[in-house]
Amino acid sequence: RFGTKCTACQQGIPPTQVVRKAQDFVYHLHCFACIICSRQLATGDEFYLMEDGRLVCKEDYETAKQNDDSEAGAKRPRTTITAKQLETLKNAYKNSPKPARHVREQLSSETGLDMRVV
C-alpha cells in the first residue's frame, strides 16, 4: 500500500525484487518494455521515456517520428557544403553579388551543388 509501485502496472514491488529504473520511475523487470512492440528492454538498450513513464524503444520511436514527418510534409535534407565548394562560391560572389543564370549554372556544375543551393 505504501511501498514502491511499478510505473507500468501500478503493482507493488517487494524490497527483495530486482527492478529497472528510468529517471525517477521504477519498473518490474517484465514491465520494462516498449509500449508499441512489447519488446523487453535490457541494460544498454536505447529508449525514449514519455512524460507519463511509458517506454518506447528507439526503433519504434524513430519509425513513428518518420511517419509524423512524412505526414507533415517531407522536408529536403540540409545541404552540406565542403570547404572547396564554399571557396568557389565566395570567389564567384565576390566578383558579382548577383550572378546571371548562366553563371549560376556554371557554378552549379563546377561545385556539384543543386542550382537551388547555388
Image (cartoon, grey):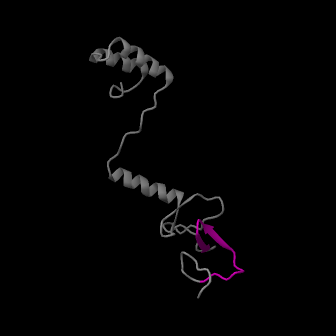
Name of the residue lying farthest toward the bottom: 1
Residue 17's spot in the image, x, y percent?
69, 79
Residue 40 lies in the magenta-colored region: no
- Residue in front for this viewpoint, 25 or 65: 25
Taking the image as shown, residue 4 lies to the left or right of residue 89, namely: right
- Residue in front for this viewpoint, 49 or 44: 49
Taking the image as shown, residue 5 lies to the left or right of residue 16, namely: left
Taking the image as shown, residue 49 lies to the left or right of residue 64, namely: right
Residue at x 60%, y 73% (from the top left corner):
27
Residue at x 58%, y 57% (from the top left corner):
46
Query: In the displayed structure, would residue 76 be above or below residue 90?
Result: below
Residue at x 32%, y 17% (from the top left corner):
97
Q: What is the number of callouts on the image?
A: 0
Residue 102's spot in the image, x, y percent?
29, 15
- In the picture, the quarter occupied by the C terminus is top left
Residue at x 29%, y 17% (from the top left corner):
98
- Residue in front for this viewpoint, 93 or 66: 93
The boundaries of the magenta stretch are 12-27
- In the picture, the quarter occupied by the N terminus is bottom right
Residue 45's spot in the image, x, y percent?
61, 59
Residue 79's spot in the image, x, y percent?
42, 33
Name of the residue lying farthest toward the left: 100
- Residue in front for this viewpoint, 103 or 59: 103
Query: In the displayed structure, would residue 82 be above or below residue 18?
Result: above
Query: In the displayed structure, would residue 98 be above or below residue 58?
Result: above
Name of the residue lying farthest toward the front: 2
Residue 14 lies in the magenta-colored region: yes
Q: Quadrant of residue 107?
A: top left
Name of the residue lying farthest toward the right: 16
Q: Quadrant of residue 68?
A: bottom left
Query: In the displayed structure, would residue 66 be above or below residue 112?
Result: below
